[in-house]
Image: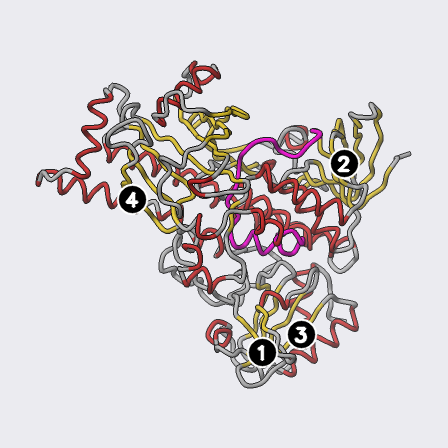
Amino acid sequence: MTDLDVPVLIVGGGGAGLTASALLSQLGVETLLVNATPTTSTLPKAHVLNQRTMEILTDTGAASEIYRRGTPPEQMAATGFYAGFAGHTDAGRRLAKLEAWGAAGADPDWAAASPCATTNLPQIRLEPVLRGRAETLAPGRVRFHQELTGFHQDDDGVTATVQDRDADEAYSVRARYLLACDAGRTVGPALGVEMVGARDVAKEISIHMTAELSAWATDPDVLIRWIWVPHMGTLSVLVPMGPERWGPESEEWVFHLNYPADDPRALDDTQVEADMRQALGIDDHPIEIHKITRWSLEGIVASKLRVGRVFLVGDAAHRHPPTGGLGLTSAVQDAHNLAWKLAAVLDGTASDRLLDSYEPERRSSVQRNVDRSVENALNHLAIGEALGLVDPDLTPAEGWARVRRLWSDDPTDAEHRRHVARMLVSQSMEFREHNVEYGYTYDSPAVIDDGTPAPVPVDPIRVYEPSTRPGSPLPHAWLDAADGARLSTLDLVRPGRFLLMAGEDGHDWCEAAAKLAERHGLPLDAVRIGHLDGDYLDPRCRWVRLRQISPKGAVLVRPDRFVAWRHLDASGDPQAKLAAALGEVLGRDLSS
C-alpha cells in the first residue's frame, strides 16, 4: 500500500524543482514536490536570468513579480573591471567597462531576439517567488522539510519513502516518474550516476553582507564589479543584492574571494573577513555579515540524465562555475524541456519514446554551458596574467606598479596597454554570449532534419542568428492580431500544444492540421501569417525575413517553442506529410 499516488514526484525545491512543479501544474499534471530543508535557499548564489529563462518563467506566471523585485535594467547595463576598490590613491580606477546582457535595451540584437529582457534577482529572493507560484498552482503538494529517504523503480513507476521532518512521520509515494532536482545529493548517487568534468578548479568564498559602499562603488550602470587587487595579487568580485535599492546604493552585497585549493585561511571566518577588508581596502568600515559560504569551482555533467523512470534536472545533472550566469538558467530550461514531454506521455498524446529525447537535447546544451562557464572563468585568469598580477611572490608595491602601466605615459608601455585592453574586451565572451544563452539548438528524435545544412555562425558565442531550421528556437517577431492587439510569434504557442505556422497561402497545411487534430485528439493549432494576408499580420515583415519558407510552406513548433519540422513549400499531400512528422516526434503512428 502507498499513502499517495501521483503521476510525477519532484525531489528538490530549488529553481529546477519549483519551475517543474509550476509548469506541470499548468499542463494539468498532478505532482508532489518534497524538499529536505525547511526553507528555500539561504545562499546568495545565482542571480542573472537570461531572456530564454524569463520566457519560461513568464509561462509559470512568476515573471512580473521577478521583474518587479529585480535589478532595474539601467543598473545592470554593464560590467566593470577595476584596480582595487578603496584604501589606496589609485584604488577604484576603472580598467574597462563592457556592455552586458543587451545594455538595458540599447543593444538591438537583444530587443529583436525576445519580448522578454534579461533581469537579475538573487536566488535567495527568486526561489520564494517561485515557491509561492508553485504552491498556488498545486495547493498542499509543495512540501518543504520533507525528505526523500529511499526509493526503488520498476517497469511501471517509482515507489519512494518520504520523511516528514516536522511531524516525524514517514509516508510512501507511488509515481509514474521521478524528477531528481536535489542538486545530486541523493537520487543520482543512489542510481550510480557519476558527475564528469573539472572539479576543484579553485576554492571560493562568498560573503553576503549589509554595507554602505556607495562612496567607492562608482558607475551606477555596472552590476558585477571585477576587482583586481594589486596589493594581494588576486581577483575579487563585488555584486549588489538589493533588495530595495540597486547599483552603488544597494543595501546588501555579495563579495567573492579566491583562495588556493589547499589554503587553510579559507576555513577561518575571522581570517576571511580580514582578507575581505584588506582586498576591498575598507579597514574597519561598518559591515554586517549574514553568511559566509565556501564552495568549489567546478564544471561537471552527469553521466546519465535519464535512468529508467528517473530524470536528473538542474544541479543534479550539471554544475557550473558562476561565470556567465548559465547554471540556474540551464536548470530552468531543463524543466521546460521535460515538462511538456511528461504531460504528453501521461495524457496519451505521445509514447514514452518522446522522453528519450530529454537526454540528447539537454546534454548538448548543458555541456556547452558548462564548458563556456569554465572558459569564462579561465579567461579572467588570463586577464590577470596579462596584468602581471598572477604571481604569488608579488609585493603590494610591485602589484600597484604593474597596474599603473595601464595609465602610464611611458611609450614602452603602449603595446602592454593594447594587449591588456584586448584581453579585457575579450570578456564579452561572458557578457555578450547571446548565441549561447538564446541560440542553443536541439538534435534528437523529437526534431526532424529537413536536409538543409547547418549554418556557419558569424560568431558561435556572441551573435544569435534566428532560424526556423529544425531544432532551432522559434524566432521572435511582432505580429498584429485581427483585433489590433500586438503579440509575439512566441505568444502563439500555447502551453502543451504544438503550433503549425503556415505562410499566408498555406491554407492546405492549416486544413490538414485541423483534420489531424480532430482525428487523433492532438493538441495542435494552426495559423497563417503574412504581411498582407493571414490569421496574423506581420507589419514589419520580420517574420517574412526569418521564416525561411515560401508563402505556401509551414513550420511545426513544439510546445517548448523549438522548431520540430518544416516544409519549405506546398505539398501534394500535406496531411500525410504532417502526420508523418508529428508521428515521428510523438513516437506514435498517425498514418491511419
The CA span between labels 3 and 1 is: 10 Å
Identify the amino acid type marked 4: Ala
Residue drawn at x 48%, y 78% is 541
Q: Residue 286 in the image: x percent, y percent?
A: 45, 24
Q: Name the residue under label 2.
A: 143
- Badge 3 element: strand
- Badge 4 element: strand
- The answer to which of marks 2 and 1 sits earlier in the sequence is 2
The disc placed on residue 96 is 4
The CA span between labels 1 and 4 is: 45 Å
Looking at the picture, does residue 308 appear above or below residue 297?
below
- The answer to which of marks 2 and 3 sits earlier in the sequence is 2
- The answer to which of marks 1 and 4 sits earlier in the sequence is 4
State which quarter of the image contains the C terminus: bottom right
Q: Viewer-nearest of labels 2 and 3? A: 2
Would residue 177 be counted in the magenta stretch? no
Question: Furthest-left residue in view?
Answer: 411
Mark 3 is surrounded, within 10 Å at the Cα level, by few (under 14), some (14 to 19) or many (20 or more) other residues, namely many
The CA span between labels 4 and 2 is: 46 Å
Residue drawn at x 78%, y 73% is 518
State which quarter of the image contains the N terminus: top right
Q: Name the residue under label 3.
A: 526
Q: Residue 121 in the image: x percent, y percent?
A: 54, 44
Mark 1 is surrounded, within 10 Å at the Cα level, by few (under 14), some (14 to 19) or many (20 or more) other residues, namely many
